Amino acid sequence: MHLMVDVVLPVLNEREALPWVLERMPADCRPIVVDNGSTDGSGALARSLGATVVDEPQPGFGAACFAGLCAATADVVCFMDCDASLDPCELAGVFGPVLAGEADLVLGARKAQPGAWPLHARVANRYLARRLDLRDLGPMRAARREDLLALRIEDRRFGWPLEMVLRAQRAGWRVQEVDVPYLPRQGRSKVTGTVRGTVRAIRDMRAVLAQ
C-alpha cells in the first residue's frame, strides 16, 4: 500500500493511552511514536504494537515533534497528542485538504466534551489563537513534510505549535481549521493538567510571539 501520511505522536509516559490510539490509526497512516524520555515503558509498548519508534533524549515537546518530522518520509505529515484526547479516526478530515491541494496547513479546532479541557488551559489557548485570527492552536494538524522543514521552526519546547503557525502565516500559507472532537485524556496532562504546566507553555509561546 502506498504510504500517504506519517503521523507524529510525541510521547512522555503515555502507556495507558497508546493501545487505543494505535489501534484506531487509519490504515493509510504510519504512526511515528517519539519517546521523549518515558519511564513507563511507552516506547517498548509502542514497538510491540507495530509502531515506528524514535527515541529523542532532548526534553521538550518541540524536540519530540522535530525528531518525528525528521524521521518522516511521507509527503504529508500529521501531528497529534497521544493521550487519547484526540481520535485518530478524525485524521482524514485534517490531512484531506492538504492532500487535495486545498490548504497548506490544517488545524483541528477542538470541540471539547465535558471535563476534557480545563478552564485555565482553554482561556490561555483562546487568547493565543485570537492573536493569530484562529479559533484554536489545535494539536492535531497536517502539512507537507518538505514545506514544514523549510519553515525552519526553532523552538524545541511548548512554543513549537505556535511558531509553526506564525511562520506558516508569514510565508503566505493557506491555513484552514476543521472541527475535531476533544475527549477526556488518559492520565494527567503534563501541560494543561496543571496551572503550572499551562503557565510554562504560555511563557514559551510568548517568547515565540516576541520574535
Image (spheres, rainbow, N blue to C red):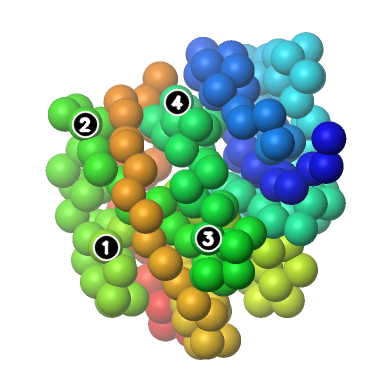
3D distance between C-alphas at marks 3 and 2: 25 Å
Marks 3/2 in contact by CB < 8 Å: the verdict is no
- Count residues near mark 4 (Cα–Cα under 10 Å), then give few for <14, some for 14-19, many for 20+: many
Placement of 116 over or under 104, stated as above or below:
above
Placement of 58 over or under 53, stated as above or below:
below
Residue at 37%, 25% in the rendered image:
185
Q: Name the residue under label 1.
A: 135
First along the sequence among labels 2 and 4: 4
Amino acid type, callout 3: Pro
One can see residue 200 in this view = no
**Residue depth check, mark 3 versus mark 1: number of the one nearer the observer:** 3
Placement of 80 over or under 51, stated as above or below:
below
Amino acid type, callout 4: Ala
Would you say 200 lies left or right of 37 here? left
Residue at 66%, 20% in the rendered image:
42
Residue at 53%, 16% in the rendered image:
20
First along the sequence among labels 1 and 4: 4
Q: Mark 4 points at which residue?
A: 84
3D distance between C-alphas at marks 4 and 3: 23 Å
One can see residue 9 in this view = yes
Q: Position of residue 66 (x, y in %)?
A: 70, 56
- Count residues near mark 2 (Cα–Cα under 10 Å), then give few for <14, some for 14-19, many for 20+: few
Q: Name the residue under label 2.
A: 113
Would you say 114 lies left or right of 20 here? left
